[in-house]
Image (cartoon, grey):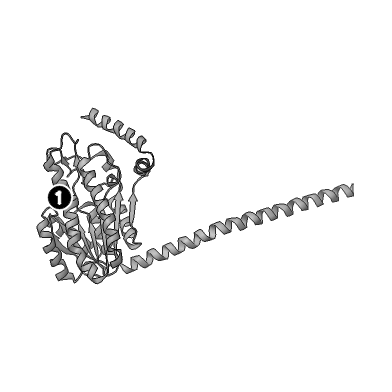
């Protein structure tokens, strides 16, 4: 009997030893996997904080700063201690944003915001406006190309002059302002150009031909520019957001050139401008080349367009038919 009990205890001890050894092995493997990940996360956090600290005192020019994402970006960069230059067509709204910045962040130690009424479609005036900014601030460290106009209408129903208006603001105005800003950055061997593109610059949707085309063009321009100015320590970041809850759809142009005047449901359910602005500031601090800020569905569409284009084309045909039924 005692012999049997002894054997049982010996077997249990052996099993316990094996279990301990297996747990030790699992723990070692787990540690080997998790430790590099923890180190990576810590290093990334330190790199981000370093980038955020370096934003202090930077001169940041923001187009489309009178509302929506541009206004949110003004708040985020101002909170980081940047000297923000607010650009848009509507002087009264720029005044409102400037007052709001001063009242909301009264403890921030930085230069007061500067206002500059600017129309991206008036290309001949952009170089002179850049000179005005540099004359006051001494430099432009970061240019945020946020200003733009959207579009609602089929290819057949959209007049060519509407295509031209949208391209003039979203592409030609943006690139002209960038070209006017670049020489000083190249001379100083320091600068950062940010383009607020769109998921629709990566995947085109029915009823958005002009808008998608302008953002596609901006993507290509950015890729060329990034390579060209790399040697001068000038960084280029392309931001491709999904739907944001702003007035973009309200102010969109229809095929006739009239204002769309409606808030789409997708826009209503979109990200808040504040959320997107925080993501963009982090991307700038980390000097990311590009970033997509969207839910899963747009990211899936980007994946399909790249790797399973036939399926993407099929889905877009279905979407176009659905748009036709609504009309």
Residue marked by disc 1: 168
Q: Is residue 151 left or right of residue 239?
A: left
x, y (%) of residue 208?
22, 40
Q: Is residue 300 left or right of residue 252?
A: right
Q: Is residue 301 left or right of residue 260?
A: right
Image quarter of residue 130: bottom left
As drawn, the residue found furthest toward the top would be 325
Q: How many marks?
A: 1
> Does any portion of residue 64 appear in the rendered image?
no
> Does any portion of residue 93 appear in the rendered image?
yes
The residue shown at (17%, 53%) is: 172
Packing grade of label 1 (10 A; few <14, some 14-19, many >=20) is many
x, y (%) of residue 127?
13, 62
Q: Nearer the viewer, residue 75 or 99?
A: 75
Image quarter of residue 298: top left
x, y (%) of residue 92?
12, 56
x, y (%) of residue 52?
34, 65
Q: Is disc 1 placed on a helix, strand or loop?
A: helix
Image quarter of residue 236: bottom left
Q: Nearer the viewer, residue 104 or 145?
A: 145
From what the image shows, is residue 302 above or below residue 285? above
Q: Nearer the viewer, residue 232 or 104?
A: 232
From what the image shows, is residue 101 above or below residue 198? below
The residue shown at (37%, 40%) is: 304
Q: Quadrant of the C terminus?
A: top left
The residue shown at (15%, 62%) is: 115
From what the image shows, is residue 138 above or below residue 325? below
């Amino acid at each position: 009997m005692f012999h049997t009990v002894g054997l049982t205890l010996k077997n249990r001890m052996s099993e316990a030893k094996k279990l301990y050894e297996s747990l030790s092995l699992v723990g070692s493997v787990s540690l080997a996997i998790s430790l590099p990940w923890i180190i990576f996360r810590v290093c990334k956090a330190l790199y981000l904080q370093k980038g955020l600290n370096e934003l202090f005192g930077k001169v940041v020019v923001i187009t489309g700063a009178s509302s929506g994402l541009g206004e949110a970006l003004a708040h985020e960069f101002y909170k980081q201690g940047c000297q923000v230059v607010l650009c848009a067509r509507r002087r009264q709204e720029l005044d409102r944003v400037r007052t709001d910045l001063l009242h909301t962040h009264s403890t921030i130690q930085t230069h007061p915001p500067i206002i500059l009424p600017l129309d991206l479609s008036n290309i001949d005036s952009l170089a002179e406006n850049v000179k005005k900014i540099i004359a006051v601030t001494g430099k432009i460290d970061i240019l945020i190309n946020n200003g733009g106009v959207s579009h609602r209408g089929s290819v057949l129903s959209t007049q060519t002059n509407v295509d031209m208006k949208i391209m003039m603001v979203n592409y030609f105005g943006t690139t002209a302002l960038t070209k006017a800003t670049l020489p000083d950055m190249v001379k100083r061997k320091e600068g950062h150009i940010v383009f607020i593109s769109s998921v629709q610059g990566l995947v085109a949707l029915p009823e958005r031909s002009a808008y998608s085309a302008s953002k596609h063009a901006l993507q290509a321009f950015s890729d060329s520019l990034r390579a060209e100015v790399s040697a001068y320590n000038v960084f280029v970041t392309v931001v491709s957001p999904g739907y944001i809850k702003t007035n973009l759809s309200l102010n969109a142009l229809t095929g006739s050139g009239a204002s769309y005047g409606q808030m789409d449901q997708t826009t209503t359910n979109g990200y808040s401008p504040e959320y997107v602005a925080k993501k963009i500031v982090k991307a700038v601090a980390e000097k990311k080349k590009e970033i997509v800020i969207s839910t899963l569905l747009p990211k899936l569409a980007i994946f399909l367009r790249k790797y399973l284009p036939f399926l993407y084309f099929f889905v877009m045909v279905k979407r176009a038919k659905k748009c036709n039924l609504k009309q």
